[in-house]
Image (tube, helix red, strand yellow):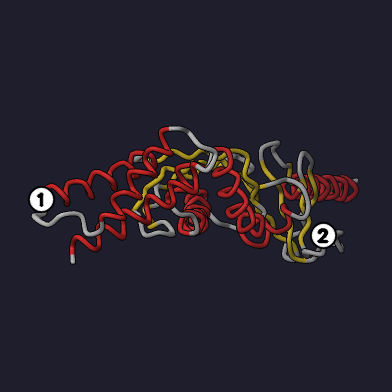
Amino acid sequence: MDSILFIVIGQMALLFMMMFFAARRYIKCPSNKLLVVYGRVAETSNGSGVQIIRNGATFVWPVIQHYFFLDLEEHKIELSPKVKTKDGIDIQAKVTFIAGISPDDPHAAAAAQRLALKSKKMIVDLLTDIAYSATSKVFQQMDLVELATTSDSQIINRLVQATAKEFRKLGVLITTCKVDFIEDTQAILQNIEEQFQQQQVLSDSPLPSSDGAKELEKINNQLQQNTKEREELLHQKITLLARLGNATKS
């Protein structure tokens, strides 16, 4: 009788231990995260070799399987690139991206492979470096006139396209982008003209080219009339100011 009781107690203890073990290895995924299981997993449709679960749970086998979580919280990426435009003018802009890991394939699989076990700070630093490089290239490919005459929405669209291409490789999508110029591009254009005029005041020599002076006056008159060729006129003005300024210095 005692032996039977001992067997029953032993079986109950074993059952309890198995239930406790199963409960510990049954991993639930919070709604704001992705559960990534790797190791020996069933073949997945994304071909990434990992199992990705959202708003669910799964049993993770010991030894042959491991897991980690990916945070779906959006990150705020702030940067202030100071670069030279295509025509050599220094500008600085404050650019802000809001971006986060996408829970959908194939982005989630890319994030599981590229951002595995990285801390929030490491992810933000990585995204900041990528965004800084991408946005700087956009500004470097535009001249001052183009920046001064292009709408904010068009500039934002260029920044998003350039940055999103690199972010997608990490499984990250951009939801918002905002850009503010530290110094307004129109003000920069005005400063260039003022600097040129100051050079003329400080210089004992007359304008290096009377034809150039007449041309500058003509462009200014046309700009005041708000002609349709405003962008082209602004481009001519910057080019002319640079040429006259260099002639004065020499």
Q: Which mark is residue 69?
A: none
Given contact means CB atoms under 8 Å apart, are the residues at marks 2 and 1 in contact? no
User: Furthest-top residue in view?
Assistant: 225
Where does the image place residue 113, in percent across and percent down from the top left?
A: 67, 62
Q: Amino acid at mark 2?
A: Asn
Point out which mark residue 46 bears.
2
Closer to the N terminus: mark 2 or mark 1?
2
CA neighbours of label 1 inside 10 A, class few (<14), some (14 to 19), many (20+): few
> Circle 2 — which element?
loop
Q: Amino acid at mark 1?
A: Leu
The residue under the point 78% across, 52% down is 105
The image quadrant of residue 112 is bottom right
Closer-to-camera residue (201/44): 201
Name above or below for residue 177 compared with residue 146: above
Q: Is residue 49 or residue 136 the one in the foreground? A: 136
Q: Which residue is mark 1?
A: 202
**Image quadrant containing the N terminus:** top right
Residue drawn where x is 23% and y is 50% of the image: 196
3D distance between C-alphas at marks 2 and 1: 69 Å
Classify residue 57 as left or right of residue 72. right
Q: Quadrant of the C terminus?
A: bottom left
Q: Residues within 10 Å of mark 2 (few under 14, many from 20)?
A: some
The answer to which of 155 and 33 lies nearer the viewer is 155
Give residue 46's position: percent from left, percent from top. Answer: 82, 60
Say if 20 sits above or below 87 in the image. Answer: above
How far from the left and from the top, in percent, is residue 183? 34, 40
Tell me the SS state at disc 1.
helix
Write the residue at 43% across / 46% down.
234
Indicate left or right for 98 with 84 as reference: right
Picture quadrant of residue 67: bottom right
